Image: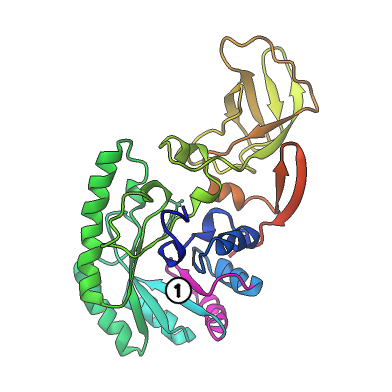
Amino acid sequence: MSLRHPGAKLRPHTKAHKCTQIANLQQNYGHKTFTCATPREIIGMAAAGVGEDLLLANEVVDHDRLSALAKVSENQRVTIAVDSEYTIQAASHAGLRDVLIDINVGLKRCGVAPELAGQLADFARKQKMTVRGVMGYEGHLMMIDSHDKRKQRVSESMQLLARAAQDVGGEIISAGGTGTFDLHDSTCINELQAGSYALMDTHYAKLNLPFDQSCFVLGTIISKSDGWLVIDVGLKSLGMDHGNPTIDGYDVMFCSDEHTTIVPNKGQAETKVSVGDKLRVIPAHIDPTMAMHEMAFLVRGEEVIDAWSIDLRGW
Ligand SMILES: Cc1ncc(COP(=O)(O)O)c(C=O)c1O
């Protein structure tokens, strides 16, 4: 990713890993600007001294959380996404100064309509805020199967962002994610907000992107019956909104709170594994999976070579 989007052209998203050690590695690859999804991620990144320019690419209205961000902004550049007069006033009252106007580029989530972006920027400037530019997240396009179709849709969506950028002014045009990392025209955006690429998941693996799966949840077989096995990894340790996890050599029958019931892949002989053995469970959605765990262990083969705190969890 760093080869394709060097330095400030990539604003890695911390939401995917929630770990300042990983963010620090990303910084070592030349990225000093970061995207965050929660106030806690901004506060944790600043406390760890990672990154120089932190963007909260999300709307926040809670005064206490905004005030905590304003405190961080005394020593560190903190920019917050806004999409209404309400969010601008809330950020301004708390003492924040730098904003990006969040544009609705088609995902039915946050973001102001492109044609209203200019007047919102004027409103922010009247509050004596610095409008650094625009962002727009095309999350609804990440999983379009065909590369060409995805490219076409991204281009249409980025035309909305470009139009808003003209009205808003400022230097930043920020968008994108792992699924669209190679589809953006550099004349349209000047930074990509990808996050999942760092660890990947089986959902994104379907797109055959050039990023390897690097994260798994280690499960222990706790029960073996005639025909199926049970491991101690379930809904409470895996982000499940993108479907069941994947385990090499096995089919997942179902997941429950603390368990996953698996059977050997069709056509395979009776499995040799026993109660007590461990299996690597690959999550379908990395972001919520990371948010459920306190520690990540770095392994080389079977050897644990380091332990990293997943220290950006919480709100
Ligand atoms: C605002 C925003 N930007 C960028 C991303 C990109 O993330 P990913 O790398 O997982 O596609 C996300 C993911 O949800 C997001 O919410």
Protein image colouring: rainbow
Q: Nearer the viewer, residue 34 or 41?
A: 34
- Residue 250 screen position, x and y as percent: 61, 22
- Residue 44 screen position, x and y as percent: 62, 69
Q: Is residue 241 left or right of residue 296?
A: left
**Residue 70 is inside the magenta segment:** yes
Give the residues in magenta.
Answer: 49-74
Of the 4 image quadrants, the one containing the C terminus is bottom right
- Residue 271 screen position, x and y as percent: 70, 15
Q: Is residue 124 above or below residue 248?
A: below
Residue in view at x 19 percent, y 68 percent: 115
Give the image quarter of residue 132. bottom left
Give the image quarter of residue 312. bottom right
Circle 1 sits in a helix, a strand or a loop, which is it?
loop
**Residue 151 is inside the magenta segment:** no
* Residue position marked by numbered label 1 in the rendering: 61
Q: Quadrant of ligand 1?
A: bottom left
Q: Is residue 285 left or right of residue 171?
A: right
- Residue 142 screen position, x and y as percent: 36, 46
Q: Is residue 262 above or below residue 114?
A: above
Q: Residues within 10 Å of mark 1 (few under 14, many from 20)?
A: some
